[in-house]
Amino acid sequence: MSQQQLRVLVLGAGDRGAVHSQAWKSVPGASVAEIVDVDLDRAKTLAEQAGVPRWSADWQAALAGTDAHILSNALPASLHADPTVAAAERGIHTFCEKPIALTVADAQRMIDATAAHDVQLAFCFQRRRIPAYAKLAELIQAGEIGRPIVHLQASAAEIRPKIAMHDKHGNGGPMVDGWCHFVDIMRIVFGADPVRAFARGFVFAKGHPSLAPIKELAIDTASVLVDFASGDLMSATWTWGMPKGVRLSLLGETLLGPKGAIRVGQKQITLIREGGEETVIECAPVGAPDPTHLIVRDFAEWVRGNGQSDITGAEALVSLKTSLAVLESIESGEPVTLQ
Ligand SMILES: NC(=O)c1ccc[n+]([C@@H]2O[C@H](COP(=O)([O-])OP(=O)(O)OC[C@H]3O[C@@H](n4cnc5c(N)ncnc54)[C@H](O)[C@@H]3O)[C@@H](O)[C@H]2O)c1
């Protein structure tokens, strides 16, 4: 089993489809058999670039006819559930982009189908393979800046060129599509789950001509507070609703504690303690593999029967429920308790 050759069907030839295709190429014993995108030219271009022999436009037909072992899904979030269920019914494992889905019901269908057919399901929360976050978790759990922690983040982007990112029924807006990465990784850092969310939110991009085809716009701007069972707190303000040309450098990721603060970068962590002493910890060795490649390699091993996923459907569901609690709080004006 451990030497099994793996054939992969990649869904989506957009940005993440390209990343998935490259990631699978880096896995010994794996190859991408076909790339599917409703935009056939895009599928063909990516297939030719990545040296993939087949491309097509209809994911249902591709799944029905494939001999692949793995579905690698890089479609928008609204298209995560149905392909996963169809794949599971054919005994095919799914490696899927985040967020798991847009609704708990869809997420649960994915979890249930993969469990019923005994196939693997894991998600691309690649921050779990970024060394800076492993170091951050170590520092927080060792009490380097004390507890409780306040995780602060502010992020502002212009209206997104990919309109699915603004579609409530496409990718679900920033609090579902982007911020889920940070909920997922803070669960690891805090060693605890979210228990309560309070948020206010807006649609700044309402009426923008580029978004006219969207029937229901997602919340594109929100300020949120999320309590964790550990007593720690996430505090975030995100917008994808800035007008063109309004580019801001806001607060990246910072953690505050009673004994100091930590600034998080992709490659280094800065620890700041009493007296102003700053310690910079380099976390990215030269030539370190891309974190998505690492997750994909792990997924191949799980499919081959070596080890178990740490990024399961149940894990991804926690982030989705947190995002949905944020949206519910925005709608009701009340804090929302998570189960
Ligand atoms: N892990 C990460 O860091 C990360 C980063 C960005 C996006 N994502 C996630 O990856 C997924 C895809 O995002 P992206 O940025 O690659 O988007 P994208 O728009 O670049 O690509 C999506 C592709 O899906 C295709 N598509 C849409 N509907 C289809 C259908 N019915 N059948 C076949 N193809 C269809 C589109 O033509 C497009 O080429 C989303 O879930 C997003 O949240 C993850």
Image (cartoon, rainbow, N blue to C red):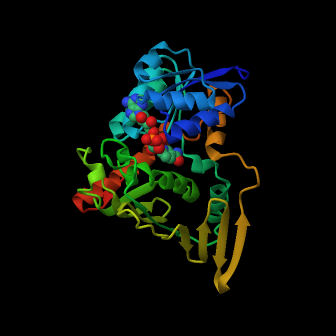
- Write the residue at 42% across / 61% down: 157
Answer with left or right where residue 17 lies relative to residue 142.
Answer: left
Quarter holding residue 237? bottom left
The residue lying toward the viewer, choosing from 225 and 62, is: 62
Residue 33 visible here? yes
Where does the image place residue 134, in percent across and percent down from the top left?
65, 55
Q: Is residue 233 above or below residue 297?
A: below
The residue lying toward the viewer, choosing from 79 and 148, is: 79
Quadrant assignment for the N terminus? top right
Answer with left or right where residue 93 lies relative to residue 290.
Answer: left
User: Given the current orientation, which residue lies at the most extreme right position?
Assistant: 286
Residue 99 visible here? no
Quarter holding residue 225? bottom left
Where does the image place residue 136, in percent across and percent down from the top left?
63, 61
Answer with left or right where residue 306 lies relative to residue 147.
Answer: right
Q: Is residue 83 above or below residue 207?
A: above
Where does the image place residue 193, in percent across and percent down from the top left?
47, 53
The residue lying toward the viewer, choosing from 17 and 274, is: 17
Where does the image place residue 239, in percent across and percent down from the top left?
38, 61
Q: Is residue 30 above or below residue 155?
A: above
Quarter holding residue 141? bottom right
User: Given the current orientation, which residue lies at the most extreme bottom position?
Assistant: 275
Q: Is residue 117 above or below residue 287?
A: above
- Write the residue at 34% across / 53% down: 325
Ligand 1 shows up in the quarter that is: top left
What is the total number of numbered labels drawn onto the structure image? 0
